[in-house]
Structures are given as structure tokens and as C-alpha cells.
Image (cartoon, rainbow, N blue to C red):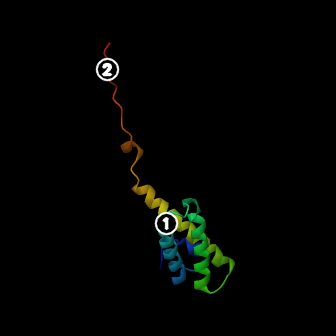
């Protein structure tokens, strides 16, 4: 008796080991791409969506629209999860700004 709503079951996607594997692989692959200096950061979300689609279709052994959609969701969630952690660990703007105190100039 699950009282919470799972986004994947609402969309008709069954949460399987393959889906959890594709989530883990997307997160790991995203961190690898982030540390690789020759791969531009702006292409990481596209690469993770492609990895999510590929791994999800391979683990479910079918190339169906629902598997492609689940792979896209996995890639987007991997990027969103990384950004959420990044933004939560970022210091707030009020602590990084230095307040300038006015100085008295002698005439």
C-alpha cells in the first residue's frame, strides 16, 4: 500500500531495474563528462538524454515510444538532480557580496 505518487507510474512507465540502472548510468556519465575538459558543458544534457534512451531501450529489449519517453525523462532528471544539488550547495548572494562602508574624505 503505497501512499505516495510515483511520477513514473502516473505516466504509465513501470519502475524496473533497467530504469534504475539507466538513472545511475546517466548520473555517472554526466559527472564523467563534466570533468572531461574537451566536452562542452552545454552538450551534457543532450548526451544524457541520448544515454538515457539507449540504456533504457537496451535494458527493456524494445524500442517503443514509452521506452524512449522514459529514457528522455531519465536524462532530464539526471541533469535536474545535478543542478538541484549544485544550487543548494552554492553560497547565497547575500553572503558573497561585500558591503562597502563609506569613507570620509578630508578636504
Which residue is painted at 46% across and 65% down in the image? Answer: 35
Quadrant of residue 86 in the image?
A: bottom left
**40 left or right of 107?**
right
Which residue is painted at 47% across and 60% down in the image? Answer: 84
Q: CA distance from mark 1 to mark 2?
A: 50 Å
> Which residue is outermost to the bottom?
61
Q: Earlier in the sequence, mark 1 or mark 2?
A: 1
> Which residue is outermost to the front?
38
Crowding at label 1, few (<14), some or many (≥20) Cα neighbours within 10 Å? few
Quadrant of residue 47 in the image?
A: bottom right
Above/below status of 46 relative to 97: below
Crowding at label 2, few (<14), some or many (≥20) Cα neighbours within 10 Å? few
Which callout, 1 or 2, points to the residue nearer the camera? 1
Q: Where residue 46 appears, x then y in whole percent?
A: 61, 66
Quadrant holding the C terminus: top left
100 or 76, which is in the foreground? 100
Q: Secondary structure under badge 2?
A: loop
**61 left or right of 100?**
right
Which residue is painted at 38% across and 44% down in the image? Answer: 96
7 or 59, which is in the foreground? 59
Q: Where residue 91 appears, x then y in whole percent?
A: 39, 50
Q: Where residue 98 appears, x then y in whole percent?
A: 36, 38
> Which residue is outermost to the top?
107
> Which residue bears the numbered disc 1?
36
Above/below status of 35 relative to 52: above
Q: Where residue 55 appears, x then y in whole percent?
A: 58, 79
> Which residue bears the numbered disc 2?
104
Amino acid at each position: 500500500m503505497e501512499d505516495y505518487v510515483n511520477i513514473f507510474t502516473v505516466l504509465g512507465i513501470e519502475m524496473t531495474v533497467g530504469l534504475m540502472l539507466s538513472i545511475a548510468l546517466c548520473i555517472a556519465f554526466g559527472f564523467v563528462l563534466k570533468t572531461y575538459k574537451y566536452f562542452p558543458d552545454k552538450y551534457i544534457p543532450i548526451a544524457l538524454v541520448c544515454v538515457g534512451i539507449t540504456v533504457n531501450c537496451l535494458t527493456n529489449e524494445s524500442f517503443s515510444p514509452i521506452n524512449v519517453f522514459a529514457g528522455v525523462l531519465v536524462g532530464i532528471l539526471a541533469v535536474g538532480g545535478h543542478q538541484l544539488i549544485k544550487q543548494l550547495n552554492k553560497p547565497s548572494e547575500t553572503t558573497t557580496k561585500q558591503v562597502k562602508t563609506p569613507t570620509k574624505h578630508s578636504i
